[in-house]
Image (cartoon, rainbow, N blue to C red):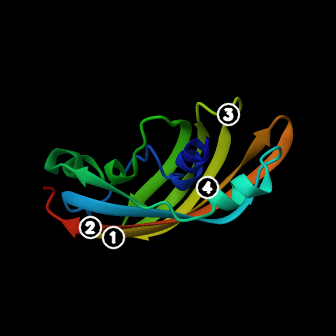
Amino acid sequence: MRKGWMVVFATGAVMLTSAATIQPEPGKWSHKGTVESIDIPGIPDFLAKSAAKPKPHNSCLTPGQASKTPAELLRQRDVKCTDIAMTMAGGKISGTASCLSPRLTEPLKVTTTGTYSARSYAMRSVSTGKRDGKPMKVVINTTGKWLGPCK
């Protein structure tokens, strides 16, 4: 269950469109999301605290993916975002989206700001919405760095 929550909130910048000139370096990347704050009705404190622990993972960005847009680095398969108003340009990430996870019945508004370069990124995503008709809010800080070629 925790993984589903982290996928929604740690990747507020999913599905970005871009006119950026800075392309991410193809290769192996390390990503880490850290919960700054979490307020989800109906989620026991012990689960919220468990979700707040950093969840590092690695990915491999192919040269083809890297050449499309910097947003390829941040894309998630199981989160669907619409009403996207995002930009990645000049090393800055900014925007909003409406995102739905398989674990939620209503979309969340995700507001994301941050910075990126060819070999790193840092972003802060604030997700707000409702769970079971009650307000919820999660703030996630996500960082990523290039580790080298994929093996």
* Kind of residue sitting beneath label 4: Thr
> Residue 146's mark?
2
Label 4 crowd (10 A; few <14 / some 14-19 / many >=20) = many
Residue at the spot of label 3: 104
Do the residues bearing badges 1 and 2 touch, measured as CB atoms within 8 Å? yes
Report the quarter where the C terminus lies: bottom left
Residue at the spot of label 4: 111
* Kind of residue sitting beneath label 3: Leu
- N-terminal-most mark, 3 or 1: 3
- N-terminal-most mark, 3 or 4: 3
Which element is circle 2 on? strand
Residue 129 visible from this viewpoint: yes
CA gap, disc 1 and disc 4? 20 Å
Describe residue 112's horizontal placement relative to residue 93 as left or right: right
Do the residues bearing badges 1 and 4 touch, measured as CB atoms within 8 Å? no
CA gap, disc 4 and disc 2? 24 Å
CA gap, disc 3 and disc 1? 30 Å
